[in-house]
Amino acid sequence: MSEHRDLTIHGQWSSRWTFVLAAAGSAVGLGNIWKFPYITGENGGGAFVLVYLVCIALIGLPIMMAEIMIGRRGRHSPINTMRILSQKEGASPHWKYIGWMGVIAGFLILSYYSVIAGWALAYVFRAAGGMFTGASAEQVGTIFSTLTDSSERLLAWHTLFMVMTMIVVARGVKSGLEQAVRFLMPALFVILILLVGYAMTTDSFMRGLHFLFDPDFSKITGAGILIAMGHAFFTLSLGMGAIMVYGSYMPQNASIASTSLIIVGADTLVALLAGMAIFPVVFANGLEPSSGPGLIFQTLPVAFGQMPGGSFFGTLFFILLVFAAWTSSISLIEPAVAWLVENHGMSRVSASVWAGAAAWLVGLGTVFSFNEWSDVTLFGKHFFDLLDFLTANIMLPLGGLLIAIYAAWVMTREVSRDELAMERPVLFGLWRACIRYVAPAAVTIVFLNAIGVLGG
Ligand code: TRP
């Protein structure tokens, strides 16, 4: 191990624990609390959840280890890391296009992520103002549609959230963030448990659990499997270089396997808790599980409106949701910002402003897709749905597939063995089997299956 490998021009996490916090902060976000419940509702529940969990274990975990490993070995932005490592391994320089695709995917995801995070911001004030106290599901529905019908409001919250993201990225992902994640993540966890506790008091708790954990395979389609797999990438921040760039700031002596396991475990737990909190409330109030992106914004306020201290807990919940989204959004542009700093000698501040402004602009499409442009569709999807489908279900799995192939077939066995430094050879063998055969085959099969379904 040569000396210079421990250094990057961007600095390094102060400890292994900081890396875990930052990566978990990136993974846990709107994907867990907003997206997981609504796509589970749209795709029929249990069977979808099972496919998602299998994808997390067989594809997500091994690819997360691969991304961290590549990042830490390359010690640069994903684009340059792929270029430099390929040069060393005598492989084609074209592998750097994985980095490029990731930068583009990150922009596109951030563009709509910020709009949805804007909803959460808006809800902080609605909860604090007591608007949900005693509100019926119908009244909460009106509060939600009043927000999304107004392009001015969505634009204002989207702009505020994007500025928040730019500020943290400009200051450097390491400062400030460490402290924030340290106590916010446990707080989010506690409040989710509290919500599950409330869900237990409704008479629909068991029905919610059945919906989530009782698989009915007649309800799953090829497209549903693709969405479940895409979500495994999305929720773990994989396939576009976010975890890779965080890995490039990771200390050399930290264990990649055990940190990945902690991150994946925490992320999955948060998603399942969110599902257990939401579906009982959905059923108890006669709401539709398949009502789409508005699901949590239309159901959780009903719960807060009924429970004692609901305004307080509701406000706290949406504040924590904003923070969870914040620690995720910064990882979406970090690969681009790191590259701008490395290749264009930009300061972090101007790199963040340019990158954030570009994502903000694309975000206007999502803002309008909920109101002015809601009739403008392609393949029956409006702008937001199309963008989400293209990024989460196509670009991320494709990026992940290429990363797996790179880690397994381009990097040598010796390099990955040294870098992962796993204590038990059996586990290393297992990882290598997953990354070499299982993950690439699974992604390919899911893609082909979905295309077959689309073709009739
Ligand atoms: N994982 C985050 C969530 O679940 C979103 C996210 C952050 C992400 N960085 C990413 C998704 C990189 C894909 C790629 O909310």
Image: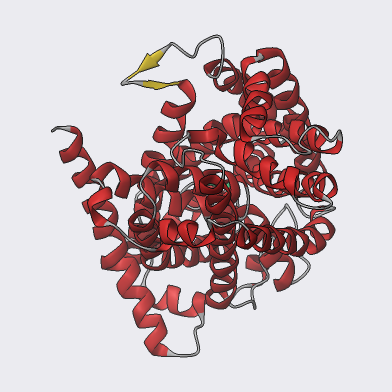
| Residue 354 shows in the view | no
205 relative position to 58: left or right: right
Give percent across and percent down for residue 88.
44, 60
Above or below residue 131? Residue 363 is above
Above or below residue 430? Residue 86 is above
Describe the colour scheme in one phrase: secondary structure
Name the residue: 75% across, 49% down.
317
Check the picture and name the quadrant holding the N terminus. Answer: bottom right
| Residue 228 shows in the view | yes
Q: Residue furthest front?
A: 203
Name the quadrant containing residue 87. bottom left
Q: Residue furthest left?
A: 456
156 relative position to 367: left or right: right
Name the residue: 73% across, 60% down.
185
The one nearer the camera, 446 or 403, is 446
The one nearer the camera, 385 or 38, is 38
Give percent across and percent down for residue 444.
24, 51
The one nearer the camera, 62 or 96, is 62
Give percent across and percent down for residue 232.
44, 54
Name the quadrant containing residue 125. top right
Above or below residue 349? Residue 40 is below
Check the picture and name the quadrant holding the C terminus. Answer: top left
165 relative position to 67: left or right: right
Give percent across and percent down for residue 385.
44, 28
The one nearer the camera, 213 or 243, is 213
Above or below residue 13? Residue 419 is below
